[in-house]
Amino acid sequence: MNGSNTGDNSQLILALSKGRIFEDTMPLLEAAGIKVLENPETSRKLILATNDPNVRVIIVRASDVPTYVQYGAADFGVAGKDVLLEHGGEGLYQPIDLNIASCRMSVAVQAGFDYEKAVHQGARLRVATKFVHTAREHFAAKGVHVDLIKLYGSMELAPLVGLSDAIVDLVSTGSTLRANNLVEVEHIMEISSRLVVNQAALKLKRERLQPIIEAFERASQA
Ligand SMILES: Nc1ncnc2c1ncn2[C@@H]1O[C@H](COP(=O)(O)OP(=O)(O)OP(=O)(O)O)[C@@H](O)[C@H]1O
Ligand SMILES: O=P(O)(O)OC[C@H]1O[C@H](OP(=O)(O)OP(=O)(O)O)[C@H](O)[C@@H]1O
């Protein structure tokens, strides 16, 4: 199904995750004249009203945002490039980079681990990550053989307890790596969050969506 959530073309649903994406999206929504009336950090509600009776925000896991938008359960959403690369982007129109939740995706190892030697030796490198698709592509492009170990969080722990030789994870200040005696050995790509729009909704609800997309674009470039 690639339809939209309702037959009523005036109703819009925006999918956001709690935390940095919700917080960083609020000023963009306000630039479009939309104010969320509840705080997801204090409310247990998953559907939040806004000052516009035709716009509601749903709160989902960061990695689930593309799925809700792909199937039309949400008309649009905000998701990190990391999440979109893992999802594949099917059924999603990605009109703008919002320049929020910026960080980088990197390879890191325990301090003292000779990464260059390990990758040149040709032995299989054990890599723990949540981002298996991106990691597979990165190492394949370098011709490095890897055993990928899928994790859902706390990747930094994996090399410390011998689960992996390396991790592929997101880095911003570097303090999580430092706190766990890890060092960045390769920079894979810069990451930021994108606006994603359901392709069918873009056609059926263009009149409602277009001004919001334009306001987001102006505010994210300001
Ligand atoms: N330290 C960071 N600094 C800036 N942006 C980050 C950082 N860590 C992650 N991000 C970006 O913010 C997005 C949302 O991260 P968040 O921590 O809210 O979700 P998550 O816990 O990674 O996801 P999930 O709940 O699905 O496991 C990520 O997909 C990424 O694009
Ligand atoms: O370089 P730093 O500034 O330390 O940021 C990097 C950390 O940020 C992210 O975790 P997050 O804070 O989102 O925690 P979570 O994965 O538990 O959600 C990421 O997975 C790293 O662990």
Image (spheres, rainbow, N blue to C red):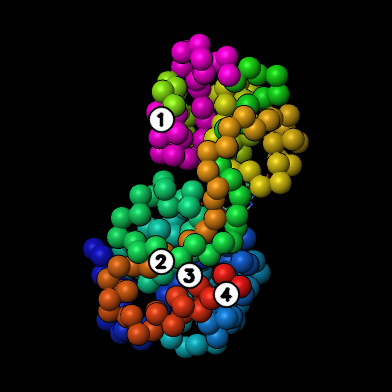
Amino acid carrying mark 1 in the image: Ala
Q: Please state if 171 lies on the left or on the right of 147 as rendered.
A: right
Q: How many marks?
A: 4
Whether the residue under disc 4 has CB within 8 Å of ligand 1: no
At label 4, which amino acid type do we have?
Ala
- Specify which label sits upstream in the sequence, 1 or 2: 2
From the viewer's perspective, is 157 left or right of 148?
right
Task: Residue 13: name its quadrant.
Answer: bottom left
Q: CA distance from mark 1 to mark 4?
A: 36 Å
Q: Amino acid at mark 2?
A: Pro
Q: Is residue 221 left or right of residue 95?
A: right
Residue 105's spot in the image, x, y percent? 56, 42
- Is disc 3 surrounded by few (<14), some (14 to 19) or many (20+) residues within 10 Å? many
Which segment is the magenta one? 116-140
Q: Work out whether residue 88 or residue 95 is closer to the camera in this orientation and state it.
A: 95
Which residue type carries mark 3? Answer: Ile
Does 221 appear in magenta? no
Q: Earlier in the sequence, mark 1 or mark 4?
A: 1
Q: Which residue is mark 3?
A: 58
Q: CA distance from mark 3 to mark 4?
A: 22 Å
Residue 86 image position (x, y, % from top left): 41, 46
State the predominant SS element of the stretch in magenta. Answer: helix
Residue that mark 2 sits on: 95
Screen quadrant of the C terminus: bottom right
Residue, far left: 1
Residue 206 in view here: yes
Q: Nearer the viewer, mark 1 or mark 3?
A: 1
Looking at the image, is mark 1 or mark 3 earlier in the sequence?
Answer: 3
* Rendering quarter of residue 185: top right
The answer to whether mark 1 is within 8 Å of ligand 1 is no
